[in-house]
Amino acid sequence: MDHLWVPDELRVAPFLDPAIRPGPPTPRYALLINPFYPKDPHASFGKHVLTPSLALTSVAGATPPEWQVAYWDENLVQGPPPWRPFPQVVGITVHLTFARRAYALAEWYRRRGARVILGGLHVLSCPQEAAPHADALAVGEGVQLWPRILGDVDNGRLERVYQGDYRQPYREDPAPRRDLLPRRSFLTTTSLIATRGCHNRCGFCYLSTEGLHMPYLVRDVEQIVAEFRDDGQPYAVFIDNNLGSRPEYLRRLCRALRPLDRIWSAAVTLDVTDDPSVVREMALAGCTGVFIGFESLSDGNLAAARKKTPRTEDYARRVDILHENGIQVNGSFVLGFDQDGPDVFPQTADWIEKNRLECATFHILTPYPGTPLFRQMEGEGRLLHKNWDLYDTAHVVFQPRHMTPEQLAEGYAWCYHRLFSHRSIWRRRPADRHAVLPYLAMSYLYKRSNRLWHLLIRHRLTALVWRPLVECTRRRHVRFRRRLEAVPISGFELRAGAVVAAGV
Ligand code: B12
Ligand code: SF4
């Protein structure tokens, strides 16, 4: 099967040569690194170059003018990270799945004389584990900490731990430094973030990590519009946890985005459909796709996870509201909850096909350290190990209640296999026949072309190949919006499925 093929450079991190002797560090030069993680061959490799994480570009935006800053993403498979000129400071973002790689990078640079600062989600949840690998830790929000840290390096007073605060309003934050990104390597460099937090606190989500206080805060809509415009790309991805937690803010944001005539996608919860007029505003503002955490089709599982969500029997009607507004749905499903037995796999796949979800992402339930789910699993003695490398939602790391770990692993692989099959892609084609061809083109390119993705990533051709397709989608969407504007709010008789998003 094509999608189970994985080349070495997407599986193994670049070699860090112990023989390199770079000479003295260059004063006031900082290098920011996004570490390598192995790619899951069940899913599309394209996902990893859809849009960059904002962690390091946000931090880079706060670099004092007297410092030079560079950015390196190991997942773009361009070899080992740079060391000429050798940086005085190396900032590394750490998630649990690539913590081991982050520590190896830290050691390599520290041994050669750089000061290494570790930040990111895993530093927040496991600071004691990270501390021995760094000269300093940035715990929590990093934009406010970064200038302080560099100032302290300058004055020779670097502290061991810096505590950021997510409760401070962040409307004054500088814009992320997207200019540092290799533009050819991503489908779009315009990752945007308008809000922080989520109105939910699901027990399995990193937002419920002990000690993380992240109230729902929003940025000025004008700032978002300016960032979108200034990056000059036709398509943006909102990487917010939940862009829809405050529908009135979302409505304002949409109205501000509308005149740009561009397209975008975002993660929202299904309750965004409580008020269909908000969905319509999203469509009119250029929303072509949403990423929705359905998580489970069992109300019992959702209640146990403490997710406030509509009842599952109402899911289908709500998906229709999005489709009727030409918004394609990428559903995210978590497998292995306590009420799941082996029948969860075919049931979930059938439901996705029946409701014609254009795209679906599967995750094996994963207890992130510091979350209520982790405490529960640990308390019940159900964690199989604490090898964070495998806590990537593609491996089973706990004992499921109603099946074996092997059944869960096989069921996960089966779900991807089925959803990426010709038959399933065809079954989920849009109801509007004009939309079928673009849907098929995008589906095949995204879901069944991992060999092509590898070449595009390696040769930095992602933007070149995708940009014309994205531009076509944008133009079609602008025409669609004009038609939608003419339809009365109450009547969704216009089947607007003529839109296929650029890659979610
Ligand atoms: C963009 C994104 C991606 C992109 C890019 C990933 C990458 N690493 O390059 C893609 C689509 C490829 C991706 C893939 C995956 N992702 Co992802 N992704 C995100 C997303 C939506 C946005 C990240 C972001 O830009 N955040 C905004 C920045 C500003 O916040 P931040 O990262 O916390 O950074 C701040 C601070 O932490 C701190 N900071 C961070 N680093 C540093 C470094 C220094 C030096 C300093 C000073 C400060 C600092 O300062 C920043 C500004 O305040 C988040 C959800 C979210 N909204 O955060 C999920 C998320 C990070 N992903 C997650 C997961 C699970 C995955 C996958 C494993 C899923 C899968 N099975 O496919 C894969 C594989 C990645 C992997 N193995 O880790 C989880 C991680 C959970 C965890 N506890 O680690 C998240 C939180 C989603 C979720 N709700 O569960 N992802
Ligand atoms: S709704 Fe999504 S983002 Fe919000 S807490 Fe639950 S899993 Fe996390």
Image: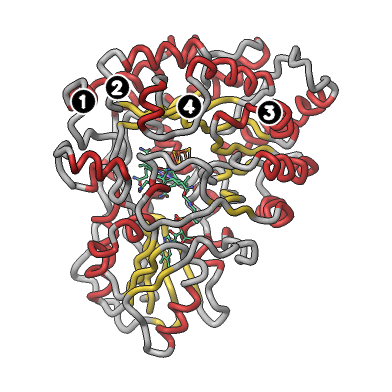
Q: Which residue is mark 1?
A: 401
Disc nearer the start of the sequence (1/2): 2
Q: Amino acid at mark 1?
A: Arg
Q: Which residue is mark 2?
A: 339
Asked if disc 1 and disc 2 are in contact, CB closer than 8 Å, the reply is yes
Label 2: how many Cα within 10 Å (few below 14, some 14–19, many 20+): some
Disc nearer the start of the sequence (4/2): 4
Is 174 displayed left or right of 452 in the figure? right
The x, y position of residue 18, in whole percent, is 19, 68
Q: Secondary structure at mark 1?
A: loop
Q: Secondary structure at mark 3?
A: loop
Disc 4/disc 3 C-alpha distance (Å): 20 Å
Disc 1/disc 2 C-alpha distance (Å): 7 Å
Disc nearer the start of the sequence (4/3): 3
Asked if disc 4 and disc 2 are in contact, CB closer than 8 Å, the reply is no
Q: Amino acid at mark 2?
A: Gln
Which mark's residue is nearer the viewer, 1 or 4? 1
Disc nearer the start of the sequence (3/1): 3
Q: Which residue is mark 4?
A: 331
Q: Amino acid at mark 3?
A: Asp
Report the residue that reaches farthest toward the right.
486
Q: Which residue is mark 3?
A: 275
